[in-house]
Image (tube, rainbow, N blue to C red):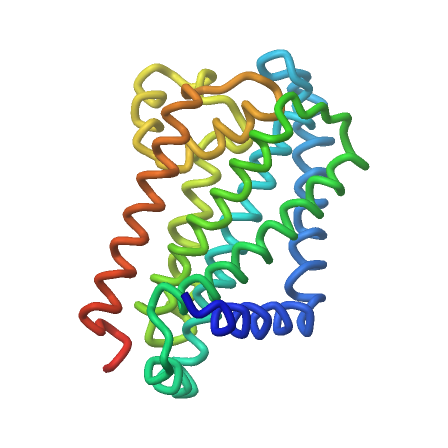
Amino acid sequence: MNLNAVWTIYIFEMRRFFRTITQSLISPVLSTSLYFVVFGAAIGSRIQEVEGVSYGAFIVPGLIMLSVMTQATSNASFGIYFPKFIGTIYELLSAPISFLEVVAGYVGAAATKALFIGVIILITAFFFVDIQIAHPFAMMLFLVLTCVSFALLGFIIGIWADNFEKLQLIPLLVITPLVFLGGSFYSISMLPPVWQTITLFNPVVYLISGFRWSFFGEADVAIGVSLFAIALFTGACLAIIWWIFRTGWRIRQ
């Protein structure tokens, strides 16, 4: 593997992140702080506890997942779409580097950005609620896996999109609703039995459930199932990316 090529792409993307630090970092942190104020204070005053955890602390994993998933997807999709838009992707394709190295550079940078934002939001949460992390290593594992898997999804979206509007289509109309309906602000055990069954078809449920378990030791879905769901999703994204580079779909058009 050409590590110099991977590092060059990675550094280029990270520098773009720090050049737009206000939009890239401060904006998601401020919006998440508003969630804490609205949900933690307003709704938390009416819902004292969920599964033995204060409501303000209970929503922290869901809020982190919401930010991490959307940021990883958006950063990766824009990162690969912009070279397509200005035409420099042909220089990238003609360079002596493999598609794995291209993906590693762009996805690695997008995952790092999302991870950085997730950690900052977690630190911010300590100023609003009292949080105890039961399994810190598992928490970081779920966070990293989520960043990588959704950065892979964002890479696919960036290849698929042929205008800037489509870059935001999937994050806004698919990912965000799935996160809200995936138990980010409630436990699915609070739902009627029929809706509990329907909710299990939402893949985001398994990510949020596993991540919440790492905080409080309680989960709506077995941890093994959550890890299997992440692995399956990641594998599917990698298979799609391999097919894209093999066929040149949306790249050489």
Position of residue 238 measured from the top left corner of the image (x, y, whole percent): 31, 53
Quarter holding the C terminus?
bottom left
The residue that appears at 56% across and 35% down in the rendered structure is: 62
Position of residue 106 measured from the top left corner of the image (x, y, whole percent): 47, 66
Left or right: residue 183 versus residue 34 is: left
Looking at the image, how many numbered discs can be counted on the residues? Answer: 0
Compared to residue 23, the image places residue 33 above or below, namely: above
The residue that appears at 70% across and 38% down in the rendered structure is: 36
The residue that appears at 31% across and 46% down in the rendered structure is: 235
Furthest residue toward right? 127
Question: Which quadrant of the figure has residue 58?
Answer: top right
Compared to residue 169, the image places residue 52 above or below, namely: above
Compared to residue 149, the image places residue 13 above or below, namely: below
Position of residue 113 measured from the top left corner of the image (x, y, whole percent): 60, 58
Question: Which quadrant of the figure has residue 83?
Answer: bottom left
Left or right: residue 124 versus residue 252 is: right
Furthest residue toward top? 52
Question: Which quadrant of the figure has residue 169?
Answer: bottom left
Position of residue 154 measured from the top left corner of the image (x, y, whole percent): 41, 59
The residue that appears at 22% across and 74% down in the rendered structure is: 248
Quarter holding the N terminus?
bottom left
